[in-house]
Amino acid sequence: LGNTAHKFMDDFVNVERESESKRILLKVMSSRNIEVKLLLAKKKYLSENRQEEFDIVQQKMVKVSKQYKNFQVKYFDHEPTQSIFLFDDECFIGPIFKDLASHDTPALHMKCGGSFTKKYMNYFDAEWQIAEEINLNE
């Protein structure tokens, strides 16, 4: 859950890079039965520079979704306020500050399953249920 998934796509799902580390999630999606769910803000809620990122990232997501059916993207209809990154049994949770880059924003790194992280996981699930699904394969 976040703004545009620009850093996420560049760091883990970069189909344009030869570096295996930049394509690691593609390898994992191919070899294991996992789902990747990205829940992002609609473009209208993003700052001007983030709106440019939105278009670039969406093009990349279209390429990935055509090859991997376990790659899903939805858009929520409000200002982005939280960043949630869940993987295996761990998560990073933090705020989204409008004029502060994600790498400069504080975040908590925790194991999933505790009462604190369950609230965030429930929040993600509730947002996912009402978010607008965009067919990236069109």
Image (tube, rainbow, N blue to C red):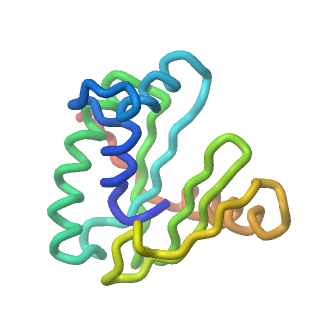
Image position of 106 (left or right of 33): left
- Residue 55 rendering spot, x and y as whole percentages: 18, 54
Question: Which residue corresponds to the image point at 68% horizontal and 66% vertical from the top-left?
Answer: 120
- Residue 81 rendering spot, x and y as whole percentages: 48, 77
Image: 105 above or below 27: below
Instruction: Indicate the quadrant where residue 48 lies.
Output: bottom left
Question: Which residue corresponds to the image point at 36% horizontal and 54% vertical from the top-left?
Answer: 5
Image position of 109 (left or right of 6): right
Image position of 13 (left or right of 122): left
Q: Quadrant of the C terminus?
A: top left
> How many labels were placed on the picture?
0
Question: Which residue corresponds to the image point at 40% horizontal and 39% vertical from the top-left?
Answer: 12
Image: 31 above or below 25: above
- Residue 79 rendering spot, x and y as whole percentages: 40, 78
Question: Which residue corresponds to the image point at 47% horizontal and 59% vertical from the top-left?
Answer: 131
Instruction: Indicate the quadrant where residue 121 lies.
Output: bottom right
Image: 49 above or below 132: below
